[in-house]
């Protein structure tokens, strides 16, 4: 008896990895935040009270400054609080009435820390909370100093660094810094008591006047608008980008509609909100939001970049959901709003999905017409990179070989593999399939001959083996089997 259970190899399908286009990844202004479950539409118009403030603000009247700071803090009832604060300002005026500017400027700071300010809290930017609790930060204390300084006749302006704010006050023909978070902060210079206390309490480093590259002089209006800036930052930290939009518009309108930087910051918050919509899977709403921005303010900075980001996310999601037709429709309708590179990459992604879907349809119902049409169309249009088309085409060839192997056997699959290689050209994957089909075909021949031999059908075994040797003379197993068959035939002939 000879071995009639030779192992058949199976060639592997190539696995088509998902096509990933090189799309534009949008650089968000926002920091990482948890997805919001509810989506609220931000307001795109300034608060009417802010509009009124911007039109009626009197920068030389401390009452007007007080009401402005209270409103910018997001608080109501400013008139009542102002009425109760007037005695405080009058008390300070009585203390400083006979002082020169230098002594007066320092006394205002000491009065604040002695009578009003009690605890530094980095995020506490509102004047309402400052007056109610004594908690303050650099912005709220600088604003308070400006109000009280104006009340006693001082000329106060603001100073801003990358992460800090304080005041400067005019003394004669020169300016003196006032680090308002510190009771020793008047004209600090090299005062050791100031530096020891300031760094320990606030964590900031004082930027002296000589370091003019690191500090910017700002007017009172800009200084007061930092209240809103800090509130915007708080909204961002808590993930409330919808509220940040309205506040950013308030700040822009308060500073004046000609403030380009404030407008760009407002647009940045609008884009942040849209980006958050995309992050939470609301791409269509993000695109509607972009239209709202354009409708209210016209084309905006980074508009194409943002729309490309939203559309890229939308198309990717639709393709993941196998909604290829919808993805194609939305891409074509939105293409005019996309930059060329993103449009081409997304078109490639959709075409790729269509081609893979057509290939899957072949494997499901063996209908190759749609696949071949889609393949040829992709090749003619050049939408998909040729290497990718070739990979999909090879997958189709491998499917055909496998299908034939199951339907008609390994001989037919081997013949098909040889013909496909002649048509498709050299490819290691197809060559591997041919080798496996050949090996399995040889195994079939050997097992057929061996089974006939073991059943005593020596003539049949001889015929099969003879044919196999003619086709595969290099296979030693057939030569050995033939020797066994001939010996059996000779023995059978002698016995007869």
Image (spheres, rainbow, N blue to C red):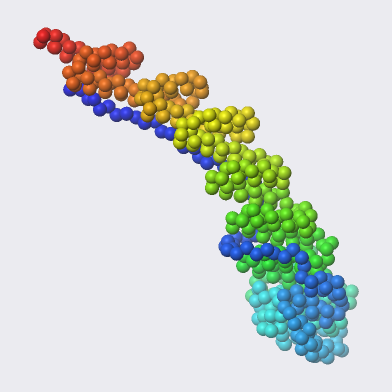
Q: Is the residue 88 above or below the residue 176 in the image?
A: below
> Residue at coordinates 61% horizontally, 44% vertically from top-left?
327
Q: Nearer the viewer, residue 56 or 160?
A: 56
Residue 55 seen in render: yes
Q: Is the residue 177 above or below the residue 309 in the image?
A: below
> Residue at coordinates 64% horizontally, 31% vertically from top-left?
381
What is the tally of numbered marks visible in this picture?
0
Picture quarter containing residue 213? bottom right
Residue 153 appears left or right of 431: right
In the rendering, at what x and y percent does residue 246 appear?
72, 66
Picture quarter containing residue 379? top right
In the rendering, at what x and y percent does residue 180 appear?
74, 77
Picture quarter containing residue 322? top right
Residue 352 appears left or right of 147: left
| Residue at the extreme right | 173
In the rendering, at what x and y percent does residue 466 appear?
28, 12
| Residue at the extreme left | 495
Q: Nearer the viewer, residue 492 or 235?
A: 492
Residue 21 seen in render: no
Q: In which quarter of the image is the C terminus?
A: top left
Residue 141 appears left or right of 285: right
Q: Which of 402 and 111 is in front in this view?
A: 402
Q: Quadrant of the N terminus?
A: top left
> Residue at coordinates 40% horizontally, 24% vertically from top-left?
413
In the rendering, at what x and y percent does residue 85 appear?
77, 87
> Residue at coordinates 52% horizontally, 41% vertically from top-left?
18
Residue 408 appears left or right of 251: left
């Amino acid at each position: 008896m000879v071995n009639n259970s030779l192992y058949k190899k199976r060639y592997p399908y190539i696995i088509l990895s998902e096509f990933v286009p090189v799309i534009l990844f949008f650089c968000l202004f926002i920091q990482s935040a948890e997805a919001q479950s509810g989506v609220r539409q931000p307001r795109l118009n300034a608060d009417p009270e802010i509009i009124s403030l911007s039109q009626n603000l009197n920068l030389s009247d401390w009452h007007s400054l007080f009401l402005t700071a209270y409103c910018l803090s997001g608080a109501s009832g400013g008139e009542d609080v102002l009425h109760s604060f007037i005695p405080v300002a009058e008390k300070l005026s009585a203390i400083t009435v006979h002082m020169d500017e230098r002594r007066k400027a320092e006394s205002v700071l000491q009065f604040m820390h002695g009578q009003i300010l009690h605890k530094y809290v980095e995020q506490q930017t509102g004047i309402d909370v400052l007056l109610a609790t004594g908690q303050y930060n650099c912005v709220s204390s600088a604003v308070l100093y400006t109000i009280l300084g104006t009340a006693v006749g001082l000329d106060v302006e603001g100073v801003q660094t990358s992460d800090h704010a304080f005041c400067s006050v005019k003394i004669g023909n020169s300016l003196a810094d006032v680090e308002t978070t510190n009771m020793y902060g008047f004209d600090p210079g090299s005062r050791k008591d100031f530096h020891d206390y300031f760094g320990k309490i606030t964590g900031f480093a004082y930027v002296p006047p000589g370091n003019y590259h690191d500090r910017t002089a700002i007017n009172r209006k800009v200084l007061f608008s930092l209240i809103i800036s800090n509130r915007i930052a708080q909204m961002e930290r808590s993930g409330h980008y919808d509220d940040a939009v309205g506040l950013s518009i308030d700040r822009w309108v308060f500073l004046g509609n000609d403030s380009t930087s404030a407008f760009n910051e407002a647009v940045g918050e609008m884009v942040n909100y849209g980006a958050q919509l995309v992050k939470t899977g609301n791409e269509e709403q993000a695109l509607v939001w972009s239209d709202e921005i354009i409708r209210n303010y016209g084309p905006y900075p980074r508009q194409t970049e943002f729309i490309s980001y939203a559309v890229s996310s939308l198309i990717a999601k639709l393709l993941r959901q196998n909604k290829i037709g919808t993805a194609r429709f939305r891409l074509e309708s939105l293409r005019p709003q996309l930059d060329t590179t993103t449009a081409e990459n997304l078109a490639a992604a959709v075409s790729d999905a269509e081609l893979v879907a057509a290939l899957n349809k072949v494997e499901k119902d063996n209908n190759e017409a749609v696949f071949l049409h889609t393949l040829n169309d992709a090749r003619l249009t050049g939408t998909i990179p040729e290497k990718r088309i070739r990979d999909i085409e090879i997958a189709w060839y491998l499917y055909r070989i496998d299908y034939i192997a199951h339907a008609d056997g390994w001989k037919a699959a081997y013949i098909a593999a040889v013909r496909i290689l002649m048509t498709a050209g050299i490819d290691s994957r197809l060559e591997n399939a041919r080798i496996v089909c050949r090996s399995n075909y040889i195994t079939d021949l050997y097992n057929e001959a061996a089974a006939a031999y073991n059943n005593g059908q020596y003539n049949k075994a001889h015929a099969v083996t003879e044919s196999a040797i003619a086709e595969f003379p290099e296979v030693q197993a057939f030569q050995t089997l033939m020797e066994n068959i001939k010996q059996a035939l000779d023995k059978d002939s002698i016995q007869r």
